[in-house]
């Protein structure tokens, strides 16, 4: 589902990110399908940190890859955004986590814009 009914490619900025988690996941899957990256793993850098981004039939996940510095040096990484048919998790929305200086401030919309920019803009992405 798109906010716009024009016959042109989906744009991340135009997605209606409201409704049930299943509706949201369906819109994200449609965007990843259109971009030709459904079921692929992308590695992107955002604000000096590396993230693994993927979307499958089951979920959309953004996973921060730990640089082994700071308070979470013992972890290989952690999910900062997750959407499946039953739930939506964004790290910055959890008060206890959001106060952590390592917390990611990007929301789902921002991640989709980053993915779209990287894939449509031809920026280098490790796949």
Image (cartoon, rainbow, N blue to C red):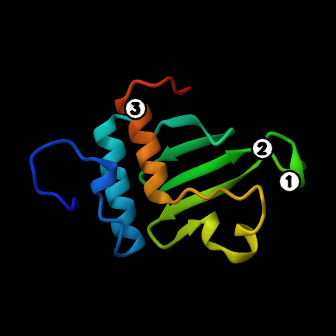
Q: Residue at x 21, y 62 (%)?
A: 3
Residue identified by numbered label 3: 119
Q: SS of the residue at dot 3? A: helix
Closest to the observer, 57 or 101: 101
Q: Residue at x 30, y 58 (%)?
A: 15
Closer to the chain start, of discs 2 and 3, is: 2
Pinpoint residue 43: horizontal percent, then vertical percent.
58, 34
Q: SS of the residue at dot 2? A: loop
Contact, mark 1 vs mark 3 (Cβ under 8 Å): no
Residue identified by numbered label 2: 66
Residue identified by numbered label 1: 72
Q: Is residue 7 visible?
A: yes
Q: CA distance from mark 1 to mark 2?
A: 8 Å
Q: Residue at x 51, y 72 (%)?
A: 87
Pinpoint residue 72: horizontal percent, then vertical percent.
85, 54
- Which image quadrant for residue 67? top right
Contact, mark 1 vs mark 2 (Cβ under 8 Å): yes
């Amino acid at each position: 589902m798109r906010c716009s009914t024009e016959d042109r490619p989906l744009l991340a900025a135009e997605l209606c990110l409201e409704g049930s988690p299943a509706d949201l996941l369906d819109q994200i899957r449609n965007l990843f399908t259109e971009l030709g990256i459904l079921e692929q793993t992308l590695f992107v850098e955002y604000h000096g940190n590396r993230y693994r981004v993927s979307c499958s039939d089951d979920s959309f996940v953004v996973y921060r890859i730990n640089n082994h510095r700071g308070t979470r040096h013992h972890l290989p990484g952690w999910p900062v955004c997750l959407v499946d048919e039953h739930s939506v998790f964004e790290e910055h929305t959890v008060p206890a986590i959001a106060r952590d200086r390592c917390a990611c401030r990007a929301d789902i919309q921002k991640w989709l814009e980053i993915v779209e920019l990287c894939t449509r803009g031809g920026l280098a992405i490790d796949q």
